[in-house]
């Protein structure tokens, strides 16, 4: 690859991307365009970001507010699908990467860049997510992944490089955590968390109260859905997807909801341990499952649950911009049309319980389900049903000589 003249860097202002700017200039002699997407990292991470990037050598800085797009066009899709990676992880980092990479590509093309760069390590999933997006949207652009090229092999090395180049950073060698935050979640990795035998220390949690410190009185929250996505809170229609999620984040966090401690299988083949906080998302997923149980027939619900596992893997593996993901989204959109109604939840010290489920499309028939014998269900029909279902079981038993 010939040396690029102008590189668009996916920039967060964190340790890795902060040192990549001077490294790119030293090793490639190129201009660096720093591209940052605001997807709800919080003011602390974004404060002074542009000035910091310019100070460390960037020629241009582009910061885009993508919070509403992130929630409405990305997060709500995994909610509608019910995608959970390995039955626990609500895909907070995974779902953000395609959007960030898409914005990076858009800026690169608009500013005449001939290469793209990212700060993902060669051991993680994010390198795959970013680069598969690059291939889908701008296959003609070269890709630079410094972690696969430079001599830096640890966070300690990166901190030392930052000190040598006068790059301000928040990390220290005493407390090194790798965190990723957006409006959907925050993840914590590294440090003592790398050993799954170590308990997660209380000081790592940043969004949620410890369940033991949560209020002693249960809280209730009602979430309304249309087409399988949240639209209202406590009977009031939300002004935006972002506003709804932010309010649910506050409610969930106050009540100690949304913490998980997970050993997961990375796409690149190794296991890793991380701790995640997804307070609002946990409430949404819980309510969504309750409403689907009320509004979807058994075969559709069970088939959707199978596809949700595949969908979660697709998102986790960075295959967002693919025909398969788009086709699955079309399926989920269709089967979620009846998923409309409200679910009221009770929250108490990290626990969630359903209080009520209501939908104009409810398939629950009180007349049929009641223990009172109504006219809508003839119990005599059960005999023929059991005989037909049990026919192969009976034939096999007779062939085995049973019943003689």
Image: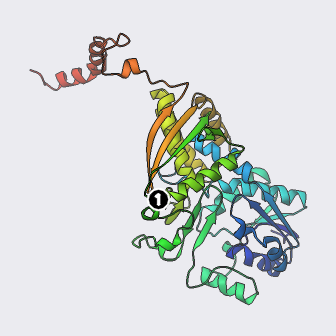
Residue 25 sits in quarter: bottom right
- Seen from this angle, which residue lies furthest bottom? 164
- Relative side of 138 to 236, left or right: right
Q: Where 288 falls versus 250 (above or below)?
A: above
Tell me if mark 1 has few (under 14), some (14-19) or many (20+) residues whose alpha carbon lies within 10 angstroms of its own. Answer: some
Question: Which residue: 54% across, 28% down?
Answer: 359
Q: From the image, which quarter does the C terminus lie in?
A: top left
- Seen from this angle, which residue lies furthest left? 404
Question: Could you say whether the residue bearing mark 1 is in a helix, strand or loop?
Answer: loop
> Can residue 302 be seen in the rendering of this structure?
yes
Question: Which residue: 55% across, 45% down?
Answer: 284
Question: Which residue: 55% across, 52% down?
Answer: 90
Colour pattern of the rendering: rainbow
Q: Nearer the viewer, residue 346 or 261?
A: 346
Q: Nearer the viewer, residue 118 or 211?
A: 211
Q: Where 37 falls versus 26 (above or below)?
A: above
Q: Nearer the viewer, residue 202 or 300?
A: 202
Residue 211 sits in quarter: bottom left
The percent coordinates of residue 126 (x first, y second) are 64, 62
The percent coordinates of residue 397 (x first, y second) are 19, 25
**How many badges with numbers are in the image?**
1
The percent coordinates of residue 377 (x first, y second) are 35, 13
- Relative side of 216 to 96, left or right: left
- Relative side of 201 to 48, left or right: left
Q: Residue under circle 1?
A: 215
Question: Which residue: 61% across, 80% down?
Answer: 155
Q: Nearer the viewer, residue 99 or 135?
A: 99
Q: From the image, which quarter does the N terminus lie in?
A: bottom right
């Amino acid at each position: 690859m010939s040396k690029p003249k102008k590189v668009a860097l996916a920039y967060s202002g964190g340790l890795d991307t902060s040192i990549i700017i001077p490294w790119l200039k030293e090793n490639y002699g190129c201009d660096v365009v720093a591209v940052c997407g605001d997807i709800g990292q919080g003011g602390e991470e974004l404060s002074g970001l542009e000035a910091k990037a310019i100070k460390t050598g960037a020629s241009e800085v582009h910061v885009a507010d993508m919070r509403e797009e992130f929630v409405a066009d990305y997060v709500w899709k995994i909610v509608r699908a019910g995608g959970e990676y390995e039955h626990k992880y609500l895909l907070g980092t995974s779902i953000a990467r395609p959007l960030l990479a898409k914005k990076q590509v858009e800026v690169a093309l608009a500013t005449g860049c001939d290469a793209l760069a990212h700060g993902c390590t060669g051991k993680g999933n994010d390198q795959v997510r970013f680069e598969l997006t690059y291939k889908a949207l701008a296959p003609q652009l070269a890709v630079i992944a410094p972690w696969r090229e430079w001599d830096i092999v640890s966070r300690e090395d990166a901190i030392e490089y930052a000190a040598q180049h006068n790059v301000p950073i928040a990390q220290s060698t005493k407390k090194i955590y790798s965190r990723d935050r957006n409006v959907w979640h925050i993840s914590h990795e590294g440090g003592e968390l790398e050993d799954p035998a170590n308990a997660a220390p209380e000081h790592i949690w940043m969004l949620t109260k410890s369940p033991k410190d949560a209020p002693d009185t249960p809280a209730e929250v009602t979430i309304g859905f249309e087409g399988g996505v949240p639209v209202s809170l406590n009977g009031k229609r939300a002004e935006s997807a972002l506003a709804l999620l932010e309010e649910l984040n506050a409610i969930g966090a106050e009540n100690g909801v949304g913490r998980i401690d997970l050993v997961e299988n990375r796409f690149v083949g190794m296991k890793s341990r991380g701790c995640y906080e997804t307070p609002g998302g946990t409430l949404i997923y819980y309510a969504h499952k309750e409403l689907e149980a009320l509004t979807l027939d058994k075969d559709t619900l069970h088939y959707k649950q199978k596809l949700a596992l595949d969908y979660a893997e697709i998102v986790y593996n960075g295959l967002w911009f693919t025909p398969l993901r788009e086709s699955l989204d079309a399926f989920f959109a269709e089967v979620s049309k009846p998923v409309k109604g409200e679910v009221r939840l009770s929250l108490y010290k990290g626990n969630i319980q359903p209080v009520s489920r209501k939908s104009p499309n409810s398939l629950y028939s009180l007349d049929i389900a009641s223990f009172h014998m109504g006219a809508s269900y003839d119990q005599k029909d059960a005999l023929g049903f059991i005989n037909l279902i049990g026919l192969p079981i009976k034939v096999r038993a007779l062939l085995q000589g049973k019943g003689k």
